[in-house]
Image (tube, rainbow, N blue to C red):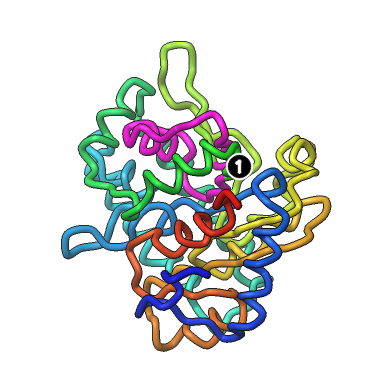
Amino acid sequence: MVPELENATVRIQRPERVAGIIRSLREQGASKLQVISDFDMTLSRFGCSGGRCPTSHNILNDSRVISEDGRKKLKDLLDYYYPIETDPNRTLEEKRPLMVEWWSRVHELLTQQNIRKGDIAQIVRESGVMLRDGFKELFDQLHKYSVPLFIFSAGIGDILEEIIRQANVFHSNISVVSNYMDFDESGVLTRFKGPLIHTYNKNNSVLQGTECFQQLSTRTSIILLGDSMGDLTMADGVPSVESILKIGFLNDKVEEQRGKYLDAYDIVLERDETLDVANGILRYILMET
């Protein structure tokens, strides 16, 4: 059905089950489909030209608008909290309050940096960020068939929207829930709008009161794209789900994380910098019969 599933980067624990889900997605067709995706290191690349690709937070943290002192403090926070975020021996219950603390401290620091709304486009242009290979086909096909693309990100909404805009794929079928900046009347960042979204609360709790999934209640087929365990709950707010296919990008610490990714995601893509598999599946689902 989907030749891309034979790619060397692909691992599937339950192939028959996955084939069944893909068949149901095709039977239900484009009018019932929505794609729910993480942004950083899922739609954007993990690696760029030999190094790590910046996330939407990194793009801002490493930009010329951040003072030397600000940069050092942000780095100290990363060195302290990142090992906690990725620690396999801590429970989600332990991690959640610490992630709130980390994001809040980062956002607090950023609001002290005199960041201007008018600088964002240039900051993104200078950042070297790259979307995954095949992004244009993914965004354009979803738009062509009027399939909603819901991006659910713990990054910075203003930055990731600008990345998509500069790639010329910010189509009308896209909606984003993320951490957005609030600027004063002279265009200076004063705070971040709530609710705060971090790696481990990407679920219905931050969508309460938003119309995100309510207006998509007929969209009962879901393709979910993520790169962390925290992304698995992104579709929890969907009122009724007939079929869901979870595709996980395993970007780092592949050997030690493989088992848990295979248990959690239907399809795992190891060190795969492309959207080829998602595009192959969409081609099959959306193919005119």
Above or below for 259 versus 287? below
Q: Residue furthest right?
A: 240
Q: Residue furthest front?
A: 289
Question: Which quarter of the figure has residue 277?
Answer: bottom left
- Which residue is painted at 34% across and 73% down in the image? 271
Q: Where is residue 189 shown, x and y percent of the image?
A: 44, 26
Residue on which the image places disc 1: 147
Above or below for 22 versus 282? below
Q: Where is residue 257 shown, x and y percent of the image?
A: 47, 83
> What segment is highlighted magenta in the picture?
151-178
- Graded by Cα atoms within 10 Å as few (under 14), some (14 to 19) or many (20 or more), the crowding at tag 1 reads many
Most foreground residue, 153 or 60: 153
- Which residue is painted at 49% across and 68% down in the image? 2
Most foreground residue, 92 or 71: 92
254 sits to left or right of 90:
left
161 sits to left or right of 240:
left
**Dot 1: element:** loop
Q: Where is residue 146 shown, x and y percent of the image?
A: 60, 36
- Which residue is painted at 57% across and 49% down in the image? 288
Question: Which quarter of the figure has residue 196?
Answer: top right
Q: Where is residue 19 shown, x and y percent of the image?
A: 62, 75
Tag 1: amino acid: Val
Above or below for 9 versus 240? below
Q: Is residue 121 magenta?
A: no
- Which residue is painted at 72% across and 55% down in the image? 28
Question: Which quarter of the figure has residue 16?
Answer: bottom right
Most foreground residue, 270 or 47: 270
